[in-house]
């Protein structure tokens, strides 16, 4: 293996580093290592130390920017592997986060209101910005935590790289809109219920997909149409348009990704040799009868409901958005 190949190989550990915003330092150190023609041992040390030295950086704007850059490189083929198969890098229990965001228990969160006043509109958008900041972390975390461990196919990384890129864009757009409304991220309290669920499902990919990427994503789709209507009724068409034309449409695809990979895991557990990749699953669906597919779908739904009963706290309350066809698991009926 020549030096150029070694250099490229070091850059593929992106999912482990993005959580603590070390990717920029990793790339910088790798570039410097190549330019200065240092030994392979020194380059390897720099890449690892770059991850540690940059863990203090936690600004979500930077995460969104780096995530977009990494996603573009992955989708263009510049980054070719989701992880280094010869290394097992630790995934942090909690990603680096801003310290100026006051966190409170979900039960102590102030009421957001119905977007009839500027204060209410600021509170709602601030809540959405906070949610998107966690969505960035969750999208990279599922790749880093489970991709290699569960021997997931390459397409798994591609799906959630796209989700991470979308979530970063949503965060940036909503944070900019919040600033236009006269506020900023961190000006109001928030809660970390999303990451509480991530901790509870950190050992189980099926549970992570069901709770974070099906239930929570679907709940967002449940309430967004009402939120859009409230902003329009309050005279804020700019925020309503952003939520309706950008966020809502893309969040449907995120929920669909959760459903797709939950189904894949359920069917792979029944026949590991057949469903080694998502293409095998899709090809097998084309050759099965409608009765067989209905039976398999029912098995997946029952498994999903069992997971939700175990891992989701409290009842699922209306409104329920019956138009979200991509989320056919219907967590609202659990």
Image (cartoon, rainbow, N blue to C red):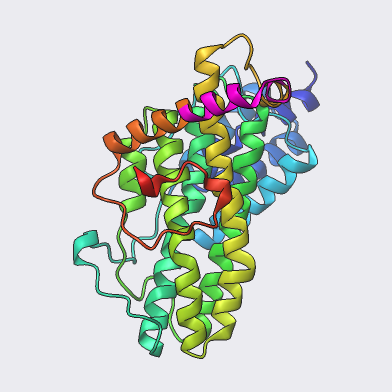
For the point 78% across and 15% down, the residue is 1
Give above or below for 161 relative to 231.
Answer: above
Residue 288 drawn in magenta: yes
Q: Which SS type dominates the magenta stretch?
A: helix
Q: Give 292 or 99, whichever is nearer the viewer.
A: 292
Which quadrant holds the C terminus?
top left
State the residue in front, 104 or 11. Answer: 104
Which residue is at a point 66% across and 38% down the rendered structure image?
A: 158
Magenta-highlighted residues: 284-298
Q: Position of residue 155 (x, y in %)?
A: 67, 32
Magenta span includes 38: no
**Looking at the image, which is closer to me, 75 or 13?**
75
Instruction: Provide residue 160's location: percent of width, then percent of height.
Output: 59, 41
Left or right: 160 with respect to 136?
right
Extreme residue in the left direction? 108
Q: Is 29 left or right of 203, judged from the image as shown?
A: right
As drawn, which residue projects farthest toward the front? 291
The image shows a total of numbered marks equal to 0
- Image spot of residue 313 (x, y percent): 25, 45
């Amino acid at each position: 293996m020549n030096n150029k190949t070694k250099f490229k190989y070091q850059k593929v550990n992106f999912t482990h580093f993005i959580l603590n915003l070390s990717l920029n330092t990793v790339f910088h150190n790798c570039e410097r290592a190549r330019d200065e023609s240092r030994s392979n041992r020194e380059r390897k040390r720099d890449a690892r130390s770059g991850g540690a030295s940059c863990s203090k950086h936690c600004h979500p704007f930077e995460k969104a920017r780096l995530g977009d850059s990494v996603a573009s490189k992955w989708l263009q083929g510049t980054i070719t592997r989701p992880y280094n198969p010869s290394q097992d890098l630790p995934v942090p229990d909690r990603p680096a986060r801003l310290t100026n965001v006051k966190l409170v228990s979900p039960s102590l969160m102030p009421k957001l209101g119905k977007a009839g006043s500027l204060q209410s509109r600021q509170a709602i958008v601030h809540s959405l910005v906070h949610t998107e900041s966690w969505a960035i972390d969750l999208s990279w975390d599922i790749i880093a935590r489970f991709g290699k461990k569960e021997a997931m196919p390459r397409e798994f990384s591609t799906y959630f790289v796209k989700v991470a890129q979308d979530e970063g864009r949503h965060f940036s757009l909503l944070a900019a809109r919040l600033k236009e409304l006269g506020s900023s991220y961190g000006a109001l309290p928030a809660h970390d219920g999303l990451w509480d669920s991530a901790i509870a499902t950190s050992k189980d990919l099926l549970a992570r997909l069901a709770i974070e990427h099906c239930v929570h994503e679907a709940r967002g789709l449940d309430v967004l149409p009402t939120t859009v209507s409230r902003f329009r009724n309050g005279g804020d068409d700019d925020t309503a348009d952003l939520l309706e034309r950008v966020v809502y449409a893309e969040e449907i695809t995120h929920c669909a990704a959760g459903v797709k990979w939950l189904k894949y895991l359920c069917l792979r557990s029944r026949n590991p040799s057949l469903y080694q990749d998502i293409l095998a699953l899709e090809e097998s669906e084309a050759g099965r009868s409608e009765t067989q597919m209905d039976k398999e779908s029912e098995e997946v739904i029952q498994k999903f409901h069992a997971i939700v009963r175990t891992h989701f706290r409290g009842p699922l309350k209306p409104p329920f958005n019956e138009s979200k066809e991509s989320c056919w698991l219907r967590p609202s009926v659990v």
